[in-house]
Amino acid sequence: MTKLKYVYEALKRASSYLDENGREEGAARILLQHELGLTYSGLIASMHDEISEQQFGEFWAKVEQHAKGIPVQHLTGSEEFYGRKFLVNPDVLIPRPETEELIEETLKLIDRYMTKKELAIADIGTGSGIIAITIKCELPEARVTATDISQLALQTAAENARRLNSKIDIRLGDLSKPLKGEKWDVILSNPPYIAHAEAPGLSDSVRDFEPHSALFADKEGLALYEKMALELPELLNKPGIIGFEIGYQQGQEVQKMLQDAFPDALVYSKKDINKNDRMVFAIIT
Ligand code: GLN
């Protein structure tokens, strides 16, 4: 490889290399910012600075790993969610922007239907903790509990909560089991919802590097909604709110499960910014 001198040359070379390897070229910028410890505007301002051989070497090693499919977030160790930085690793699902929309709608519903401030809110299958921690940061007076069946995921959630100074209660266990015996005002979940049959169509970055326990579920991906719909009636207060993230073809079925479980509730699905069904909510009054 010919020697490089400037930051912009490193970016250009990495962008074309990733493009040639069928990856998004934008990943080059993120990896370069990470290597140089710069914000986006900082990087733009540094384009004509020199890059040292060592920095270029470290940067290029990550570019090559990403070309092989390793997610950028595993290489940088973090992802942004709702304006905050969360640590991620192969034990947890990488935060997706769709889940920010679940938070947004939930906050709107709370504002509209809830009068008390000290809400009891639970996030089932918290993974990296994004839903529980974000809700606690946005509603500091709420009492927020996060569950997961994976001890390793909960370690990551606990570390994220600590770094973001968010006091949440973290409980190990299957779905809503750790919530039993108490009543909850709001229950949220972004459970695994991809059908096993869809695995071949997923990008290798997702299929080969993200935890399968966070991606896939039985019964065409619907198994965990079905279980939760059965478990939740004894856990919800009135008024109560349920919010699930779902797969884009699951709206009608998940809506029906919640309507059957809560016959008097207002149940609806909501599209994400890409116009795909992505959330189902139930308002129990
Ligand atoms: N609730 C976590 C998230 O939204 C984990 C989701 C999952 O593992 N399916 O990222």
Image (cartoon, helix red, strand yellow):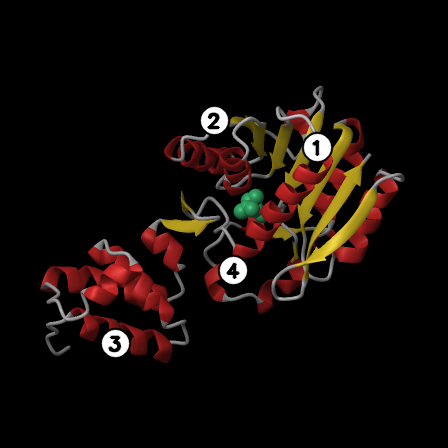
- Labels 4 and 1 touching (C-beta < 8 A): no
Q: Residues within 10 Å of mark 3 (few under 14, many from 20)?
A: few
Is 64 above or below relative to 77?
below
Q: Between residues 280 and 159, which one lies in front from this camera angle?
A: 280
Between label 2 and label 4, give the one nearer the viewer.
2
Label 3 and label 4: CA atoms lie apart by: 28 Å
The residue carrying mark 3 is: 12
Between label 3 and label 4, give the one nearer the viewer.
3
State which tag comes first along the sequence, 3 or 2: 3
Residue at 60%, 48% in the rendered image: 104
Q: Amino acid under label 4?
A: Arg
Is 88 above or below relative to 151?
below
The residue carrying mark 1 is: 114
The residue carrying mark 4 is: 207
List x then y, in percent, for residue 187.
67, 35
State which tag comes first along the sequence, 4 or 1: 1
Label 4 and label 1: CA atoms lie apart by: 39 Å
Q: Which mark is residue 71?
A: none
Label 2 and label 4: CA atoms lie apart by: 33 Å
The residue carrying mark 2 is: 167
Q: Between residues 91 and 160, which one lies in front from this camera angle?
A: 160
| Residue 60 shows in the view | no
State which tag comes first along the sequence, 3 or 4: 3
Between label 3 and label 2, give the one nearer the viewer.
2
Is 197 above or below relative to 172?
below
